[in-house]
Image (tube, helix red, strand yellow):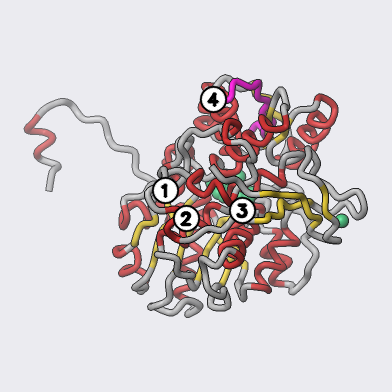
């Protein structure tokens, strides 16, 4: 099995480092990204491979395949959304349905790569700061790797997400505060105790998992570049990683130029610091102190990659837009009723922004549009139930029930 040669490169000053357990540049404190000397690959390389994101192992940062910790995540459906497309007036609309991953969100991608790398580094334990989904993705991979796992999450997240993470056997620290506070604690514990915190001190490797959201979409579109991508955004790590993924496919000559690609950022009203900066034409993201939104997985007031998302939007002629709770919940139902896909509010955010963009004439009906749906509706039923009519309990009586049918 051929694996890539890698090093770490500062996103700001471009200084390079050996690929060690390190994530911040000594010179300028910029984030370090994994930089590759890719082996030669062709379209055929990936044919007939396993249906997980590890099918792209040549382009991922694990050097010895025995360190790969896989729960068979990835290669999720790219659904041609004919019915939703008809409803909105689009002829080439696709939903990347990442809600059907093993732990039911896209977070299986970054968590799996970060934990594999933690194993490669010989770390003894792992953890994460989470808005809910990363908790389960990290805990499930840690269970598979037989590593202790520490979760730091705000106490107000959905019950299903807590139940799920606890079931995988993680040590769960429920922090009385916001995600940013949980994140600060996780960073300090990671440093003090040598825990591989997947989205903090393992972040350089973590984002490598999310770039497979670009690889898969490109492969599923038969190695064509989409015109519009709509990405639900919290910290901004995923949006940035998707851009990196498309660029790498260009580097290895699997894609032509990306000039026709537009990258868009979708955030919920009540926690939309990147949208605020974009609309002010500022490159400074001002943190939201107390996020308030039904899209709890996107409630990251101080987005670590916010500044880089703004750069990406400029680079790829995209926009940042926000949507309110009612619109998010309406979009969840629209997606469910047209395509049979049940998403949590984060996916409602991207579908709602998609709808707005079409209504505002920002997407042409023939353009290839990919809307990322990144988490499952079963994780947030308490929020979604608030807009549904609870069924009335009826006596088990055929006559009475047939009287109310059609
Ligand atoms: C379902 C879902 N979608 C999108 C995101 C946003 O990802 P990022 O924080 O990388 O912007 C998250 C983050 O937790 C999430 O759980
Ligand atoms: Zn630097």
Residue position marked by numbered label 4 in the rendering: 144
Residue 307 falls inside the magenta stretch: no
- Circles 1 and 2, Cβ within 8 Å, touching? The answer is yes
Element type at marker 2?
A: helix
Span highlighted in magenta in the image: 145-155
Where residue 149 sits: x, y (%)?
65, 24
Q: Which mark is residue 76?
A: 1
Element type at marker 3?
A: helix
* Of callouts 1 and 3, the N-terminal one: 1
Distance of mark 4 from mark 3, alpha carbons?
24 Å
Residue 147 falls inside the magenta stretch: yes
**Residue 143 appears in view:** yes
Distance of mark 1 from mark 2, alpha carbons?
8 Å
Residue position marked by numbered label 3 in the rendering: 238
Residue 405 figure quarter: top left
Residue 129 or residue 78, whichever sits in front? 78
1 vs 3, front mark: 1
Residue 400 or residue 385, whichever sits in front? 385
- Circles 1 and 4, Cβ within 8 Å, touching? The answer is no
Distance of mark 4 from mark 2, alpha carbons?
24 Å
Distance of mark 1 from mark 4, alpha carbons?
20 Å
Side (left or right) of 81 relative to 359: left
Element type at marker 1?
A: loop
Element type at marker 4?
A: helix
Asked if disc 4 is less than 8 Å from ligand 1, the answer is no
Asked if disc 2 is less than 8 Å from ligand 1, the answer is no
Asked if disc 3 is less than 8 Å from ligand 1, the answer is yes
Give me the residue at 40% from left, 59% from top. 220
* Of callouts 1 and 2, the N-terminal one: 1
């Amino acid at each position: 099995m051929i694996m890539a040669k890698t090093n770490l490169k500062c996103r700001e000053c471009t200084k390079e480092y050996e690929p060690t357990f390190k994530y911040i540049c000594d010179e300028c404190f910029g984030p370090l990204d994994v930089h590759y000397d890719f082996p030669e690959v062709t379209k055929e390389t990936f044919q007939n491979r396993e249906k997980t994101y590890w099918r792209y192992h040549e382009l991922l940062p694990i050097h010895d395949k025995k360190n790969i910790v896989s729960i068979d995540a990835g290669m999720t459906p790219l659904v041609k959304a004919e019915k939703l497309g008809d409803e909105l007036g689009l002829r080439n609309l696709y939903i990347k349905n990442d809600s059907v991953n093993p732990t039911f969100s896209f977070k299986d991608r970054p968590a799996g790569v970060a934990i594999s790398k933690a194993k490669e580094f010989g770390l003894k334990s792992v953890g994460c700061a989470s808005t809910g989904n990363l908790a389960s993705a990290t805990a499930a991979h840690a269970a598979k790797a037989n590593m202790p796992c520490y979760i730091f999450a705000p106490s107000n997240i959905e019950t299903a997400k807590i139940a799920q993470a606890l079931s995988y056997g993680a040590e769960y620290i429920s922090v009385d505060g916001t995600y940013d506070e949980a994140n600060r604690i996780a960073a300090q514990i990671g440093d003090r105790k040598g825990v591989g915190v997947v989205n903090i001190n393992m972040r350089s490797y973590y984002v490598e998992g999310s770039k497979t959201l670009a690889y898969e979409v490109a492969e599923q579109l038969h190695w064509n570049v989409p015109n519009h991508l709509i990405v639900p955004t919290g910290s901004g790590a995923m949006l940035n990683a998707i851009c990196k993924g498309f660029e790498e496919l260009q580097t290895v000559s699997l894609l032509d130029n990306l000039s026709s690609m537009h990258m868009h950022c979708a955030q919920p009203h009540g926690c939309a610091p990147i949208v605020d900066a974009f609309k002010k034409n500022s490159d400074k993201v001002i943190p939201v102190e107390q996020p308030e939104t039904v899209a709890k997985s996107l409630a990251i007031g101080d987005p670590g990659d916010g500044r880089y998302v703004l750069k990406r939007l400029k680079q790829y002629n995209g926009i940042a837009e926000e949507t309110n709770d009612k619109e998010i919940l309406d979009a969840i139902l629209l997606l469910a009723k047209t395509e049979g896909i049940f998403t949590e509010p984060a996916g409602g955010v991207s579908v709602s922004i998609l709808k707005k963009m079409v209504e505002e004439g920002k997407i042409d009906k023939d353009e290839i549009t990919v809307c990322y749906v990144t988490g499952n509706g079963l994780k947030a039923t308490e929020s979604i139930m608030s807009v549904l009519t609870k069924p009335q309990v009826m006596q088990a009586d055929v006559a009475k029930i047939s009287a109310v049918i059609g």
